[in-house]
Image (spheres, helix red, strand yellow):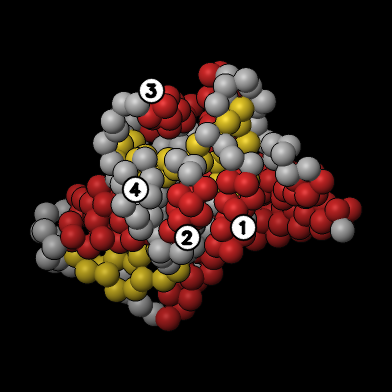
């Protein structure tokens, strides 16, 4: 089974690269070459899982990844989607744990709720000092909090929201303010059009239903749009934080004949998928609506996303940084000392566009 999994992953990579080269020649999109590296990252993630899962079954006390320091034992239950954000965040946690001498391990739920619950059951059986939990679903992942609470393992919630009571079900939550991000995306769309524009028709490509980030961004986007009566959402389709899914959804919207002026993606992958669909249909994504260009706004900060902004195809990115492992371990250390923590610790994000993208290129993930 292991050999089959690895060979299948490599086969998927080769097929993906071939299809990308045929459908999107490099001359059409200067930054599409980076797609090959992104696909390879996904394959390497799948190969890593193929290696790590059997190892975990042989000995559940071995870390699936991470350092074996002499400090407190910390486990991270990751959403585990082969998405550049989760890959970067896991790497940051591992690096920070190693720096501080923590004994660290991570499990990847492969974006499956039932696997995350099973992972947490396995984790708490090993009685770690702390569980870092990245919820897949706001409601469904709450079962993981109950499992940890019953086992007496304190939980630090990261990445997105979860249903629970601070101080009872978890110690604190640490992640970006997704409502703020949604509001900034609405502002970016509005400000991209002249003041005398009569109507701004928006397509939304949203994230995974039930995820706290999807819920927050959708709420923030709509709340801020109330300040801009000229803006209205003409289509809202699942992008699922996935480039191929978003591209297909956008192709369907274009083929349906729906008229639109702007696109809001809940992540860079959705925005780039939409841009590729526009280009394949002979449409132009850019920064000047007066020339018939479609305004595309999203959030993230991936290498591909930043390149697309630099190339002029992607109007604005509101960052959702994966670089906050220090805040997570600061919280763990503070709690271990008996210090009282706020129920929510905000991760700061920024707005990136053509005017400042050059200074943020190095932070792409």
| Residue under the image location 22 percent in, 69 percent down | 232
Residue 332: name its quadrant: top left
Give me the disc on residue 168. Answer: 4
Q: Which residue is drawn at 38% across and 45% down?
A: 170
* Visible residue check, residue 343: yes
Residue 303 in view in this figure: no
Please state if 297 lies on the left or on the right of 110 as rendered. Answer: left
Query: Dot 3: within a 10 Å radius of its alpha carbon, few (fewer than 14), some, or many (20 or more) residues?
Result: few
Which residue matches tag 2? Answer: 143
Marks 3 and 1, the one that precedes in the sequence? 1
**Mark earlier in primary sequence (4, 1):** 1
The secondary element bearing badge 1 is classed as helix
Q: Position of residue 204 (x, y in %)?
A: 35, 65
- Count of numbered circles in the view: 4
Who comes first in sequence, dot 4 or dot 3?
Answer: 4
N-terminal of the pair, mark 1 or mark 2, is 1
* Residue with the most extreme bottom position: 256
The residue carrying mark 1 is 118
How far is disc 4 from disc 1 in space, using C-alphas? Answer: 22 Å
Q: Answer above or below: position of 182 versus 74.
A: below
Label 3 sits on residue:
337
Work out how far the residue at label 2 is from the one at label 4, CA to CA, in angstroms. Answer: 14 Å
């Amino acid at each position: 089974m292991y050999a089959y999994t690895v060979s299948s992953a490599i086969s998927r990579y080769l097929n993906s690269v071939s299809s990308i080269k045929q459908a999107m020649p490099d001359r059409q999109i200067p930054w599409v070459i980076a797609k090959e590296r992104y696909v390879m990252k996904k394959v390497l993630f799948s190969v890593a899982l193929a290696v790590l899962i059997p190892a975990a079954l042989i000995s559940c006390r071995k870390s699936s990844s991470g350092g074996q320091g002499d400090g407190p034992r910390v486990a991270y239950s990751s959403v585990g989607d082969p998405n550049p954000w989760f890959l970067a965040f896991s790497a940051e946690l591992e690096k920070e744990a190693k720096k501080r001498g923590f004994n660290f391990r991570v499990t990847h739920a492969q974006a499956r709720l039932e696997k995350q619950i099973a992972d947490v059951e396995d984790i708490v059986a090993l009685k770690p000092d702390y569980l870092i939990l990245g919820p897949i679903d706001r409601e469904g992942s709450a079962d993981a909090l109950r499992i940890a609470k019953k086992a007496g393992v304190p939980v630090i919630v990261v990445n997105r929201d979860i249903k629970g009571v601070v101080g009872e079900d978890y110690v604190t939550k640490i992640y970006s303010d997704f409502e703020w991000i949604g509001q900034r995306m609405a502002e970016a769309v509005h400000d991209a059009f002249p003041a005398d524009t009569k109507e701004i028709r928006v397509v939304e490509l949203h994230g995974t239903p039930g995820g706290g980030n999807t819920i927050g961004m959708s709420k923030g986007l709509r709340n801020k749009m109330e300040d801009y009566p000229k803006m209205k959402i003409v289509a809202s389709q699942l992008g699922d934080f996935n480039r191929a899914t978003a591209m297909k959804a956008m192709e369907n919207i274009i083929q349906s004949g729906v008229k639109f002026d702007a696109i809001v993606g809940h992540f860079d992958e959705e925005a780039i998928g939409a841009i590729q669909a526009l280009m394949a249909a002979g449409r132009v994504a850019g920064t000047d609506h007066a020339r018939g260009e479609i305004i595309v706004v999203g959030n993230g900060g991936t290498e591909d996303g930043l390149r697309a902004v630099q190339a002029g195809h992607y109007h604005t990115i509101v960052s959702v940084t994966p670089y906050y492992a220090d805040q997570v371990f600061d919280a763990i250390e503070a709690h271990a000392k008996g210090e009282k923590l706020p129920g929510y610790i905000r991760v700061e994000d920024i707005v990136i566009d053509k005017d400042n993208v050059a200074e943020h290129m190095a932070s792409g993930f």
